[in-house]
Image: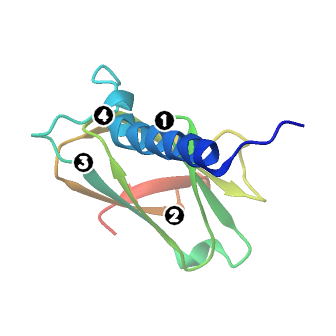
Amino acid sequence: MKTHNYSTRGAILLLIVSLFFSALVAGPAAGADPRSPHAVAPSQSPARLVIRRMPNLGFNVIVRLWIDGQPAATLGYGHTYHGFLTPGRHVLAVLATPRSRSPIPWEMPLNVQSGQTYIFTATGGSSGDLILASGF
């Protein structure tokens, strides 16, 4: 095993630390893809999304929330989801577990405007399925 003297170790450590900090500083600027569908222009602020869970769904019923096909939240009794969305079209989906009348999540499209707040309540629909209702 080859050993290094203290000055060589110090130089190697300094090189590693400087590479780490240069990557840390350059990383966010280099990693932002302006063509990304979720990239937000500086003049556009994200919108707020609030999803409340209606208490009368039952104590053991869990509301699963997806945004654009990606899991976003699991809402138990008395919980509320607070998040942000980029401006543009999104799809919100909810499913009651463990007992759902349909194994397919209920979906709704949402055209999001910059800086707006969207508030929905996860509640039972007329057919007994879980839906997102606005204005509650």
Q: Nearer the viewer, mark 2 or mark 1?
A: 1
Q: Separation of disc 4 and disc 3 at Cα?
A: 19 Å
Residue at coordinates 70% horizontally, 68% vertically from top-left?
61
Q: Separation of disc 3 and disc 2 at Cα?
A: 26 Å
Question: Quick one: label 1, few (<14), some, or many (20+) residues within 10 Å?
Answer: few
Q: Which residue is mark 2?
A: 123
Residue at coordinates 30% horizontally, 19% vertically from top-left?
35
**Tag 1: residue type?**
Asp
Query: Which numbered circle lies on residue 68?
Result: 1
Q: Secondary structure at mark 2?
A: strand
Query: Which numbered circle lies on residue 27?
Result: none
Pointer 3 or 2: first along the chain: 3
Pointer 2 or 4: first along the chain: 4
Horizontal and vertical percent for residue 60? 74, 74
Q: Could you tell me which quadrant the C terminus lies in?
A: bottom left
Q: Separation of disc 2 and disc 4 at Cα?
A: 42 Å
Q: Considering only vertical position in the picture, is 46 above or below 91?
A: below
Q: Separation of disc 1 and disc 3 at Cα?
A: 16 Å
**Tag 4: residue type?**
Ala
Compared across the picture, whether 36 is left or right of 14 comes to: left
**Tag 3: residue type?**
Pro
Q: Secondary structure at mark 4?
A: helix
Identify the image quadrant of residue 59: bottom right
Q: Considering only vertical position in the picture, is 46 above or below 73?
A: above
Pointer 2 or 1: first along the chain: 1
Q: Separation of disc 2 and disc 1 at Cα?
A: 20 Å
Q: Which residue is mark 4?
A: 29
**Tag 2: residue type?**
Thr
Compared across the picture, whether 65 is left or right of 111 comes to: right
